[in-house]
Image: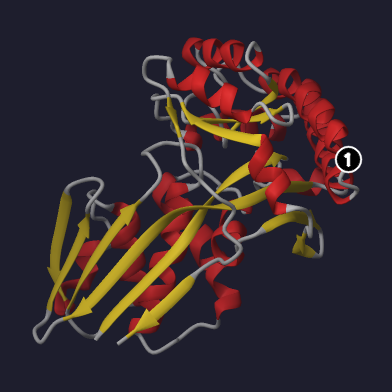
Amino acid sequence: MIITASAPTRVDLAGSTIDIPPLYLFHEGAATVNFAISLLAHCRIETRDDERIILESVDQRCQVETTVSDLASLKNETRLQLLSKLVYFFGPETGFHMTTKSEAPAGAGLAGSSTLNIACIGALNKLVGDRYPPDRFIQIAANVECQVIKVPTGYQDYYSAQYGGIASINFGPAGIDREPLHIAVDEIERRIVVCYTGEPRNSGTNNWEVTKRHIDGDPEIFGIFEGVRDTSLALKSALKAANWDEVGRIMAASHPDRKRLSPHITTPQMDHLIEVALANGAIAPKVCGAGGGGCIAFYCTDGRRNEVEAALAAEEGAQVLDWHINPAGLTLSST
């Protein structure tokens, strides 16, 4: 049997970090706004006639091997930890070769690991006979990823990977709700440039620093997160109203507040690229994910996306990504 799965990465426009439990419980109305993009994470599983289990990451150029009878060895495997812990969790009873790869740059801040997580869960669940319904995938993904990075993980990335499209992910005591946003896809694609800075980042570290300060009762951090919540709600309203000037104003105003969360949100390279983009037609930058490297999304003046892309592409180390909004989420096939 051959099982293939893919899931889309995402660009987040507002609400970063407030999706980490328990932070969203302290800010009524907490939400994030993001959209899935066409850079996919892939997982392929081919069953074998023997007990060998081979886990292969094309991106990391690494393999881990074990056997069905020695699955316990994957519990504390230090190589390919996410893949190893997922296979250990599902406990398959047949040999197989699992291969993974991502179309997004490493450490891009586009939720690459969370997206790969969802793709692998879909494929492994199919391998073990659809043991879990799809509505359990996100909780499994968050729990296993937390085991890997050893700090709490946010939830917004799993929703874009599983369901695709443009959405607000709304958080509260009753749980998490995905609200699709039915807005003009072509307007978003025409307005936004996504640039990889050339510097990978470690989101677990950045987010945990902020989370600790919040839990310790830092009043400044609490106030910043109130602003993060307000920005998300305002941006959602502007998008739904197709008020594109207001979208730009909100995103521009939110960038300085976002930087107040941590001195590591941007690097000198990122600050330079932001200056270049703003000088060539960008209205606002949005550091993707936790920052500290990775990608920046730029909201542009209508008709000036090409100018912004050309200016950024001329900068050493920068890579302008080719993308489209992906309306679908997790896709699975088996033969």
The quarter holding residue 226 reads top right
Left or right placement of residue 233 versus residue 67 in this view: right
Q: Residues within 10 Å of mark 1 (few under 14, many from 20)?
A: few
Residue, disc 1: 243
Locate residue 20, reporting x and y percent.
65, 46
Query: How is this picture coloured?
Result: secondary structure
Quadrant placement of the N terminus: bottom left
Q: Relative to the observer, which residue lies in front, 81 or 201?
A: 201
Locate residue 311, reporting x and y percent.
51, 17
Locate residue 102, reporting x and y percent.
35, 51
Taking the spot 17% from the left edge, 50% from the top edge, the residue there is: 62
Residue 165 visible somewhere in the drawing: yes
Q: Relative to the observer, which residue lies in front, 61 or 192?
A: 192
Of all residues shown, which one is farthest toward the left?
50
Taking the spot 57% from the left edge, 58% from the top edge, the residue there is: 326
> Against 203, is 324 above or below?
below
Left or right placement of residue 79 versus residue 268 in this view: left
> Against 174, is 284 above or below?
above
Locate residue 84, reporting x and y percent.
28, 61
Quadrant placement of the C terminus: bottom left
The quarter holding residue 136 reads bottom right
Q: Relative to the observer, which residue lies in front, 98 or 215?
A: 98
Q: Relative to the observer, which residue lies in front, 203 or 314?
A: 314
Q: How many marks?
A: 1
> Against 177, is 20 above or below?
above
Identify the secondary structure beneath mark 1.
loop
Left or right placement of residue 74 versus residue 255 in this view: left
Q: Amino acid at mark 1?
A: Asn
Taking the spot 11% from the left edge, 81% from the top edge, the residue there is: 51
Taking the spot 67% from the left edge, 19% from the top edge, the residue there is: 281
Residue 222 visible somewhere in the drawing: no
